[in-house]
Image: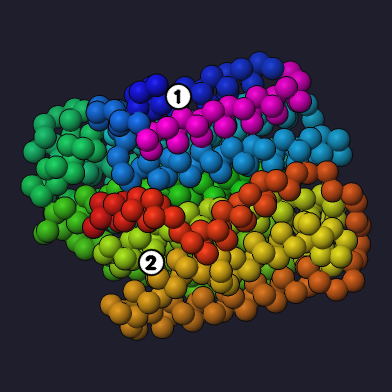
Amino acid sequence: MTGADALVAVLAVPVGAAALLALLPGYRAGAWINVAASFLAFLAAAALVVLDRPAPGDLLHVDDLNIVFIVLNTFVGATAATFSAGYIGQELKSGHLTPVNLRFYHAMYQTMMFGMNLALVSNNIGLMWVAIELATLTTVLMVGLYRTHEALEAAWKYFILGSVGIALALFGTILVYMAAQPVLGEGTPAMVWTNLIGAAARFDPAMLNVAFVFLLVGYGTKVGLAPFHAWLPDAHAEGPTPISAVLSGLLLNVALYAVLRFKLLMTANEAALAPGPLMIGLGLLSLVFAAFMLYRRRDIKRLFAYSSIEHMGIIVFAFGIGGPLANFAGLLHMVMHSLTKSAIFFAVGNVAQIKGTQRLADIRGLTQSHPALGWGLVLAVLSIAGMPPSGVFMSEFLIVTTSFARMPLMALILVFGLVLAFGALLLRLTGIAFGEPTGQNAPMQGSLVPLWLHLALVYLIGLHMPQAMVDWFQAVAGVLG
């Protein structure tokens, strides 16, 4: 297999699986095909790390930056599909979903994976926009899968706010094309990323400045940054839990990837606006806002939805600071957040089925009633709260020390938000995990393998980050500038 073959497989496998799943009537076969296709896509993405990379074309390319995103995307997509097989099967048994819903669900899952994969390997800024829009539309449909009033309302809110965001991103993309056109000529060459980054120094800086503001707000809506975040808590709370895991662990990262690409374009033009301060401001706003909102949540999935807003704020803040160490820390935090937050939603999905509710007040004593699940959730929440020896602690430590060295005042705001969020999560965890079990305590049907696999990776990396991974992330941090 060559690198070109692996790149084709990353896109072709989910497309083929989506077409097959749309025709296949049975749930069990559909679930197995969904899992198998997701793991095949991950293997193809992992092959890109070791194989010779294909030369960039007008539509697709692979480089040091996007290969991290594509490997993470396909890995979490595969583990989420594995969790989904048991979780969605239980939803079918309980009558919450019908076989028709499930055929649609599996086909949309692979379509969503195709959209995200395509966005990450696109070498054309227009194609990247289309791919992110495809991923968004499929997740909108999946958020409304239960067809309840609340689920449909959440899907419509997501659709409307997501459409506003993607429209702003489209306008920013058009402005970038207009800035590039006098230099690169009309048509496709002025939309190819590798052409744009090479010629960015000659673009009109005023046009780039306006474009980046639209792009940051547009794609920032997809990232879930405050104050553009309103769709995210509802989408997490009302959609199927595997989709909540994918939203937090993957789709937010895909939008972040788009922001980072355009940040590189801005920094390549010395006369253009510095993107760092805007990203630092939005990152800190998201962190502090979400930290306060964690104290007011009464629904377990909404609680961790706001935690996603908090952590995306931390990541954007780190990339806004820039430089080798901050970029390294931001990249590490993104990976650790994706693994940990998806693990949390794997646990939360099982908890909601066991207890028959998502209300925090009705979830108590999980470590007594379901020890493997309860302690898994404890470790996952301690990790996302930044407790050692998790990988999240390592990345947050690097971000805090870097910000104190370079921006002490901003570092104080950062630490304030982190401490505030830490208190809220520990307060909620005490009630959920410990004490006398209350309410319904049904037997657990879902698999815990994805949860514990993610936790093992997060804590192993926290204890010792392999040198190969350090070298890899350092190379990517250097690309980010």
Q: Residue at x 57, y 61 (%)?
A: 459
Front residue of this view, candidates 316 and 62: 62
Question: Is residue 470 placed above or below 111 in the rendered structure?
Answer: below
Quadrant containing the N terminus in the rendered view: top left
Q: Which residue is drawn at 65% across and 24% down?
A: 33
Disc 1 marks which residue? 9
Protein image colouring: rainbow
Residue 285 in picture, x, y percent from top left: 44, 71
- Assess whether residue 47 is covered by the magenta stretch: yes
Res 238 seen here: no
Quadrant containing the C terminus in the rendered view: bottom left
Question: Is residue 388 placed above or below 210 in the rendered structure?
Answer: below
Disc 2 crowd rating (10 Å Cα; few below 14, some 14-19, many 20+) is many
Residue 440 in picture, x, y percent from top left: 91, 57
Query: Closer to the N terminus: mark 1 or mark 2?
Result: 1
Do residues under tags 1 and 2 come within 8 Å of each other at their CB atoms? no
Front residue of this view, candidates 309 and 379: 379
Residue 104 in picture, x, y percent from top left: 67, 27
Residue 453 in picture, x, y percent from top left: 63, 49
Which secondary structure, mark 1? helix
Q: Which amino acid does label 1 sit on?
A: Ala
- Assess whether residue 177 is covered by the magenta stretch: no
Which secondary structure dominates the residues rendered in magenta? helix
Q: How many labels does the image show?
A: 2
Region rendered in magenta: 25-50
Residue 97 sits in which quadrant? top right
Which label sits in the foreground, 1 or 2?
A: 1
Q: Which amino acid does label 2 sit on?
A: Phe
Disc 2 marks which residue? 317
Which mark identifies residue 386?
Answer: none
Task: Find the distance from the CA under tag 1 to the CA under tag 2.
Answer: 34 Å
